[in-house]
């Protein structure tokens, strides 16, 4: 007897396969840009609105021993702002659905709100929380929706990369993953439970902060769009995996030059949660600052991503179901 | 020693008080309509976008013994569409953040998607799911954001009711609460755990369906706006409580006439989750169909809501923290 795939559990199927099944049921999109890019673009009289949603769940996505309320508000805002930026759009508003255990301190909720506001003020001035919902749950869950405006421009999709163009990145590569490694190595007990965090000094501390309170280059999203980026994506799951998504969507391959990456090439390629912006530009249009070249768009080969001309055989990306366990703390 | 309110837990403070503290931290809104109405209205080049978010959490908001995946998708869409309609707007898109236990059947997720699509097709043709997020959680959580368009009109706020106007309602009053009462009375065991549902026939079955799969009059939101409604609100927490919110926002009182309500006046006044639309109109502008008069806007008295000219002394509304317990099943 072969099992009907409909009887499988969510834990037995990859996120991508579950999404495909959902999209089959939902049917065709009527939006300007429907599911499949960093954000949707929905027609509105006189223009459009860019919209995206991303959720942080206690356990799979964070530890309360490591993240303060402020950190969580900041990160929940930042990761959504990055998806708006990756469309070449300017963030205009956040809506925040917060599901909280009854035992949550009100002071924690206030710190969380301060973190949301802090991230908006620092990363996307003019954007603020304009709506939300508060519910009770056994599991602290933060679902943020970000809206943005293209100000009359076309969205920068994943699918626009053309052979011969320069591949460039803005923001950090591998910092957030290094920070997570430090947290797991130094701030868990023998049973894997999180210990209270004492942020280290120097580089390690910067990596930990990149994980807990990321500062993606939001304003550079519109910079890239205005400058003429042909494709762009938010690097949330690691450079190699997100570059492969861009390559697949564009029908090209992307050759990354290791000498243009940070010293820890492997972490730069596979570490997730940095929310850097990966974009492609015609060579003469690469911005003078903010973005730095890391490779070239080449004709499609058997592999979507190459490293110095050879198939990149490493781990292809970050997997939230592997890199974070579900221990709550 | 008096406790600092910041040290209280979420369970010790009302939702309204927690929201006020959050809003204090978030600071002033820069939106056309910020927090406090059914939805936010955010400026966009050439117009605006209406946006709202609402969450369903397993335990506080639903039982899996009673709600199918289809029911949950339908309800999650419908309650958000109703908030868009209550601004006088036309729903254009949903974004759906779904947090699922790993043990969830994929077939359940597909039914959920079908419910989302079914509600959009039936209640708001042209609106579809255009984005989303899938995460793992111990607690099944559904956070939906709905977007809408005013098509150039001004939003219909809670605050526009004027003395002398007619108070009218579209949709059912008390049905969903009657359905919930039937579920708790007939489909729980002696320990309060839910039993599998066999939907009754006749009126009781309709009430149960109003609870599990509500069909708010979404299209009548734009009808009311075009016709000239001065104020409108989604009746999600019971007529008395939502009328009081409208009265408070408008600086008036609302006198409801019991003879214009369903026979079970008390349930009509206090039952939540119907997602009817409550609106006020100058007398000559009440629509001929869809909306039915239930009272008048009068000068502000000590009570925001009166019943036949007397202060309504009953339970003033539906409280999700009381009417649903947190038993999971």
Image: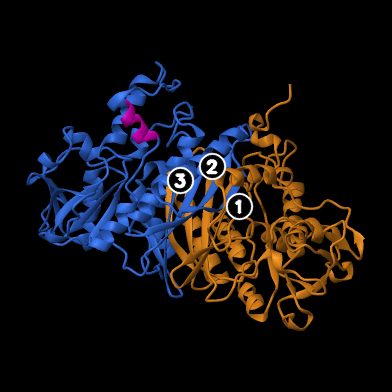
Chain colours: A orange, B blue
Q: CA distance from mark 3 to mark 2?
A: 16 Å
Q: Which mark is residue B123?
A: none
Q: Residues within 10 Å of mark 3 (few under 14, many from 20)?
A: many
The mark nearer the N terminus, 3 or 2, is 3
Circles 1 and 2 in contact, beta carbons < 8 Å: no
Q: Which mark is residue B55?
A: 3
Q: Chain of mark 3?
A: B
**Label 3: which secondary element:** strand
Q: From where the camera sits, is residue B85 visible? A: yes
Q: Return the x and y of residue B267 as percentages of the image width and height.
A: 22, 34
B177 over B132 or under it: above or below: above
The outermost residue toward the top is B190
Would residue A317 be counted in the magenta stretch? Answer: no
**Label 1: which secondary element:** loop
Q: Chain of mark 2?
A: B
Q: Are marks 1 and 2 on the same chain?
A: no
Q: Chain of mark 1?
A: A
| Residue on which the image places disc 2 | B113
Please give left or right for residue B136 compared with residue B314 in the image: right
Q: Are marks 3 and 2 on the same chain?
A: yes
B134 over B182 or under it: above or below: below
Residue at 87% in and 60% down: A301
- Judging depth in this view, the residue of A115 and B37 nearest the camera is B37
Query: Magenta segment, which residues?
Result: B205-212
Would residue B210 be counted in the magenta stretch? Answer: yes
Q: Residues within 10 Å of mark 2 (few under 14, many from 20)?
A: many
Magenta stretch, main secondary structure, is helix
Please give left or right for residue B21 compared with residue A304 in the image: left
């Amino acid at each position: 007897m072969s099992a009907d795939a409909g009887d499988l559990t969510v834990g037995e199927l990859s996120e991508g396969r579950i999404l495909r099944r959902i999209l089959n049921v939902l049917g065709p999109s009527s939006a300007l840009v429907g599911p499949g890019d960093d954000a949707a673009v929905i027609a509105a009289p006189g223009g459009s609105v860019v919209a995206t949603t991303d959720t942080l769940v206690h356990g799979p996505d964070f530890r309360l021993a490591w993240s303060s309320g402020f950190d969580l508000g900041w990160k929940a805002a930042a990761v959504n702002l990055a998806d708006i930026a990756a469309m070449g759009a300017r963030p205009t508003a956040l809506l925040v659905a917060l599901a909280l255990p009854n035992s949550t301190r009100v002071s924690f909720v206030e710190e969380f709100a301060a973190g949301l506001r802090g991230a908006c003020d620092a990363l996307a001035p003019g954007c603020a929380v304009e709506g939300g919902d508060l519910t009770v749950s056994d599991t602290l869950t933060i679902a943020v929706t970000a809206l943005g405006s293209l100000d009359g421009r076309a969205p920068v999709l994943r699918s626009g990369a053309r052979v011969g163009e320069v591949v460039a990145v803005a923001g950090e590569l591998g910092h957030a993953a290094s920070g997570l490694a430090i947290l797991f190595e130094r701030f868990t007990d023998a049973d894997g439970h999180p210990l209270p965090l004492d942020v280290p000094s120097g580089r390690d501390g910067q990596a930990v902060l990149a994980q807990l309170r990321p500062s993606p280059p939001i304003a550079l999203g519109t910079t890239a769009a205005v400058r003429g980026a042909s494709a762009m994506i938010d690097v949330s799951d690691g450079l190699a995996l997100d570059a492969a998504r861009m390559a697949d969507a564009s029908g090209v391959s992307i050759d990354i030059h290791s000498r243009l990456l940070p010293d820890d090439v492997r972490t730069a390629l596979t570490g997730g949660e940095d929310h850097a912006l990966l974009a492609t530009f015609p060579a003469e249009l690469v911005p003078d600052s903010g973005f730095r070249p890391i490779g070239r768009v080449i004709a499609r080969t058997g592999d979507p991503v190459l490293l110095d001309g050879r198939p990149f055989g490493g781990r292809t990306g970050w997997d939230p179901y592997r890199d974070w366990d579900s221990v709550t703390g």
